Amino acid sequence: METIGTSQNNMYNLLVIDDEPEITRSLKRQFRGMYNVFTATSANDAFPILETENIQVVLSDQRMPGLTGVDFFAKIKSKYPDALKLILTGYSDIEAVIGAINEGQVFRYITKPWNPLELEVAIKEAFEKYELITHNKRLMETLRESNLTLEKKVKERTAELEALNETLTQLNLEKNKYIGIVAHDLRSPIGSAFQFSELLFEEFDHFPKEKILEYLDFIKKRCEYALALISDILDVSKIEAGVFELKKTEANYHNFVKEVVQQNKILAESKSQHIDFTSDLSDVVFSFDKNKMEQVITNLLANAVKYSLPEKVIKVEVSSGDRQIVTKVIDHGLGIPQEELSDIFKPYKTTSVKPTANEKSTGLGLAIVKKIVEAHEGTIGIESEVGKGTVVTFKLPI
C-alpha cells in the first residue's frame, strides 16, 4: 500500500486499487500533481484507507483477487455513499459493470487499455460530481437547519403570543372585575348620600336642627369615603401606567414619623386607643418623598386602628440597620389568617377580618403602600397571627 500527498492539504483524495503494482505506480505518477493519491493492491488493503482518510473518488480494477471491483463497491456503498466510484475493466466484464452502474454502485467505467487523457477527464468529472453532491447536501442541511430554526422561532413566537393573549384576557377580566368593584363601592356611599340629601330637601322644615346636622354629617362622611376611594383608584392607575413620580427632599426621618404619628393619634383616641412611638435614630437625615411616605404611615396606622379593639396600644418603631431605615407598625388587633397574607398587598383584595367598628375599606390602601415603598427602592412585609395582631415592616435604603 502506497500513498502520495497528504490529506491535510487542500487537494482532493483519490484512492487507486489494482493488483498490478506497475499500474498503481503509473496512475500515481499521472495524478500526483492534481490530487492526494492513495493506492492499494486489493480490497482488503483499501478498507483501512477508507476508514482513516476522507476519500472522495475511488478508481478500482474490476478483476482483483478476493473481491472484484463491483463487489467491493457494493460492499462500501452504504458506508461511503458520497464517494464516487470508477471501474477499470476489460470488455469481458462490461455487462457486470453496466449492471453496477444501473444500480448506482458505479459512477463510470473506463475500458482497458485506457487513454490517459480520457481517464484524466473521467476522474476530473468524478471530483466535480462529488463537489456538486456535497454542495447540494450542505445546502439542504443549511435549509433544514433554517427550517428548524424558523419552526422553533414560529413556535416560540406563537407561544409568546398565546401567553400574551392569555395575559391580556386575564387583565381584561381583572379590569372588568375592578370596574364592577369600584362601581359597587362608589354606588353605595353616593346612593346613600343622595337619599339623605333628597330627604333633607323634601322634609327640611319638619326636622329638628339636631337631626339635620346628623344627616349632614352622614352625607359628609359618605362623600369623604367616595373621594378617598376615587383618590386611591387614581393613585393605583398612575402607578400601573408608569406615571408615578416621587418628589424627594432631604428630611429628618425621626421628626417626620413623629409628626405623622401625632396627627393620627386623634383617629386612635376616637376608639379609645393609644399610639406609642419609639425611635433610635433622632439625627438621621436622608432623601424621600414626604407626602408619599406620610400616605404610607397614615394608611398603616389607619388599618391598625380599624382592626384593633378599644383600649389597645398601637406601636410605631423606627430603627436602623445595614444602611436601612426600618419602620414597624405593630397592633394587637384581630390578626389575619395565614392563608390570606399572600394576597394582602394586591389591589382590591380584602381579608375575611372585619373592622371592629364597621369602618369602610377600599381594598387599595396596602397596594398603594407597597408601590410607594418599592418606588423608594425599599421592601415591605407583613406578619400576623389571628387573635394576636399584625406587624407591618418596611425598610428604606439610606
Image: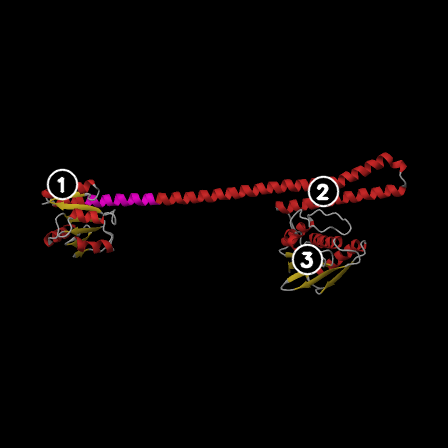
Mark linked to residue 328: none
Q: Which residue is mark 3?
A: 384
Dot 1 or dot 3, earlier in sequence: 1
Q: Secondary structure at mark 3?
A: strand
**Separation of marks 1 and 2 at Cα, in angstroms:** 98 Å
For this rendering, which residue is in front, 277 or 42?
42
Q: Is residue 330 left or right of residue 53?
A: right
Q: Say which quadrant the N terminus sits in.
A: bottom left
Q: Residue at x 13, y 42 (%)?
A: 94
For this rendering, which residue is in front, 398 or 101?
101
- In this view, the residue farthest toward the top is 202
Image: magenta residue range:
124-141
Q: Which residue is mark 2?
A: 185
Q: Secondary structure at mark 1?
A: helix
- The answer to if 20 sits in the magenta stretch is no
Q: The residue under label 1 is which amino acid type? A: Glu
Q: Nearer the viewer, mark 1 or mark 2?
A: 1
Mark linked to residue 95: 1
Q: The residue under label 2 is which amino acid type? A: Asp
- Residue 77: image location, x then y, percent: 23, 47
Q: The residue under label 3 is which amino acid type? A: Ser
- Residue 97: image location, x then y, percent: 15, 43
